[in-house]
Image: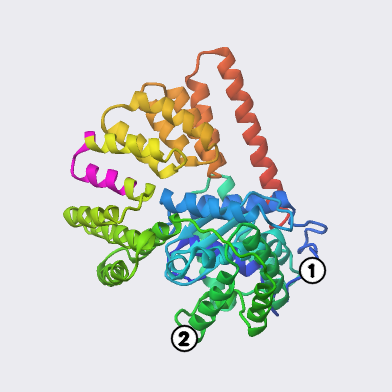
Amino acid sequence: MKKRTGSRWVALALCVQMASVPVLMAQPMGIPSIGTAAGAELSPNLERTLGDAIMEQGRRDPQYVSDPVINQYLTQLGQKLAAHSSVPLHHDIQVFALRDSSINAFALPGGYVGINTGLLASAASESELASVVAHEIAHVAQRHVARGMTQSSESSHLMIASLVGALLAGLAGSADLAMGVAAFGQAAAVDRQLGFSRQAEQEADRVGYQMLQGAGFNPVGMADMFKRLMQSSRLNESPNAYATTHPLSAQRLSDVENRIMSNTTASFSESDDFWFVQAAAMVIQAQGGSALVSLQQRLQSLSSSRTGVSQAAAYYGLAYAAKQRRDLAGAQQYLQRAMQTGVSSATMDVLQVELLWAQKQNAQALEKAQAAWRQWPQNQAVALALVEAMQKQNQTTQSIPFLQQRILQWPKEPRFHQLLGAALEQNQQPIAARRAMADYYILVGALPSAVSQLQQARNQSTDFYEQSTLDVQIRDLREQLERDRLLLERFKS
């Protein structure tokens, strides 16, 4: 993964990936004990504890992409693929994006898979992207990261001990956790090269191919992505490209092509959402300046050469880029062109709502958001846009039941709990607000903050039954914190 100075998130991922790679790049087949923690293995529970703690810190980094359009798409893609894994998964799969132009992806402990925007931008089809996601899920399913983290090498002991020590500080509520891990990760990155063994990669290819085929994607996408990555590596487009952490070879490509030749499935399906997510990722990656200008030129070319959904997505990308430059008139013009293609998209509707807000047309924005929700009742970005539109129109009270319904619909999506907490606070319901915020912190892995919120609610309550319920929740969370601490302590030395 590409290292950037001062990036907490990249350092965290580097810590885990480096800890997962032995000195001679030989992936272990068993799970030996580590250091002085005789008999201690990286159990699924510990693996999840590590992953949750890393993600809790990683979400704070500017490189982490919080865009709901991208997040929902990637997670649903990962879950669709995971449903067809031939190897049992110990954890739910959660896929997220990082703003990084290098073509890369990686797996973390606990079922987390990271995808760089550079990989999203370079994929020529959804099947190509899905092939990489499936490959990473295969690493998770086969517990390659977990096995690597229990290597017997002295350097691995040092890295995992440093990582765990920092995560333990996080469980104690230390504000310096992320910076401590970043310093270690950057220092370790100088001395270690990431990579999985050839055997591990071939096995991940096999399991990933089965997932890709089972989920209805075109397996040719895996071979095409292989060729693209190998070409990228030969051209040295990135010193930390995917080939560095996932050694590519002609043998691996040949194995995939042989599987494709024996595949009899003729029909495949791909989501239109891919093209809009790709365009959004391109703009997020470019950020501004000359990179954004270059992207606009590329999107202009694509909008002229493409047709249908991919053309609409190119216009959407131009509209999104114009909005980033605060060119609202230009953004509206490009969005209108996208709509004139006849393509209907929740992503375009969300951008239209945002443009109406930017032009202070809040009533029209609310009307558009309500219409979009009627059309796209399974889209989180549309739901979030409607909540914000309601609140901008001083309909905070009305937004509360809507948010409660969305939490029932998507119980594991933290943002809805956070918005509910803010709405309840504004509606003079402080105890309920803190309980909602506690749920938010639990979902993002910040258990000390969750305990603090519940304790505040307990102190404000005068109802005996409510106090008793809160006491039980506080006790349970503190016990979970202690269990997590004890799990991590086993690997500290």
- Kindly report the distance in space between the C-alpha atoms of the residues bearing marks 1 and 2: 34 Å
**What secondary structure prevails in the magenta region?**
helix
Q: Which residue is mark 2?
A: 235
Residue 418 visible in rendering? yes
Image coordinates of residue 53 in percent, x first then y, are: 58, 51
Image coordinates of residue 374 in percent, x first then y, are: 39, 35
| Quadrant of the image occupied by residue 6 | bottom left
Confirm or deny contact between disc 1 and disc 2 (CB under 8 A): no
Amino acid at dot 1: Met
Crowding near pointer 1: few (<14 within 10 Å), some, many (20+)? few
Q: Is residue 6 rendered to the left or right of residue 411?
A: left
* Magenta-colored stretch includes residue 361: yes
Q: Going 57% across and 18% down the picture, which residue do you hit?
A: 467
What kind of element bears circle 1?
A: loop
Magenta stretch, residue numbers: 350-363
The disc at residue 29 is: 1
